[in-house]
Image: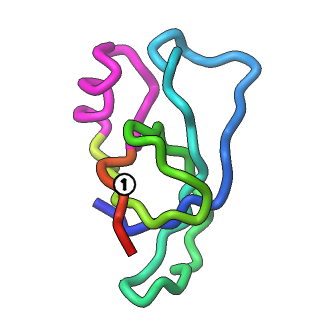
């Protein structure tokens, strides 16, 4: 699980059918003080309606992510597991 901040939205003109209905957000990994770690942003599906600049927990467990979208063949790897109240 990673501590991240939502820094943007991802838009796909074509995506795997298992991702229909899910919004995709760009997440930037941070340390506990809110400083970006230097890793590039990555895409995660959003289950909670997280907004721009909100801090979130992201799971990188691909098996769990495929369970969320209910498709063992899905390419999904990351999903927002919770929104952090500041």
Residue 63 belongs to the span the image colors magenta: yes
Residue situated furthest right in the rendering: 13
Image point 48% across, 69% down: which residue? 29
| Crowd class of label 1 (few under 14; some 14 to 19; many from 20; radius 10 Å) | many
Q: Position of residue 21 (x, y in %)?
A: 51, 18
Q: Nearer the viewer, residue 83 or 9?
A: 83
Q: Position of residue 57 (x, y in %)?
A: 34, 59
**Colour pattern of the rendering:** rainbow
Q: 82 left or right of 75?
A: left
Residue situated furthest front in the rendering: 86
Residue span colored magenta = 62-79
**Corner quadrant of residue 27:** bottom right
- The answer to whether 45 is drawn above or below residue 55 in the figure is above
Q: Position of residue 84 (x, y in %)?
A: 35, 65
- The answer to whether 69 is drawn above or below residue 81 in the figure is above
Residue situated furthest bottom in the rendering: 33
Image point 27% across, 44% down: which residue? 61
Image point 45% across, 66% down: which residue? 55
Q: 67 left or right of 40?
A: left
Image point 31% across, 53% down: which residue? 82
Residue assigned mark 1: 58
- Image mark count: 1
Q: Nearer the viewer, residue 50 or 76?
A: 50
Q: Nearer the viewer, residue 46 or 36?
A: 46
Image quarter in which the N terminus is found: bottom left
Q: Position of residue 50 (x, y in %)?
A: 48, 49
Q: Nearer the viewer, residue 5 or 41?
A: 5
Image quarter in which the C terminus is found: bottom left
């Amino acid at each position: 699980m990673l501590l991240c901040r939502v820094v943007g939205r991802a838009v796909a003109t074509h995506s795997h059918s298992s991702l229909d209905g899910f919004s995709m957000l760009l997440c930037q990994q941070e340390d506990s003080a809110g400083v970006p770690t230097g890793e590039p942003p990555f895409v995660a599906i959003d289950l909670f309606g997280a907004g721009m600049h909100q801090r979130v927990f992201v799971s990188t467990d691909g098996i769990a992510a495929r369970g969320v979208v209910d498709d063992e063949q899905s390419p999904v790897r990351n999903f927002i597991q919770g929104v952090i109240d500041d």
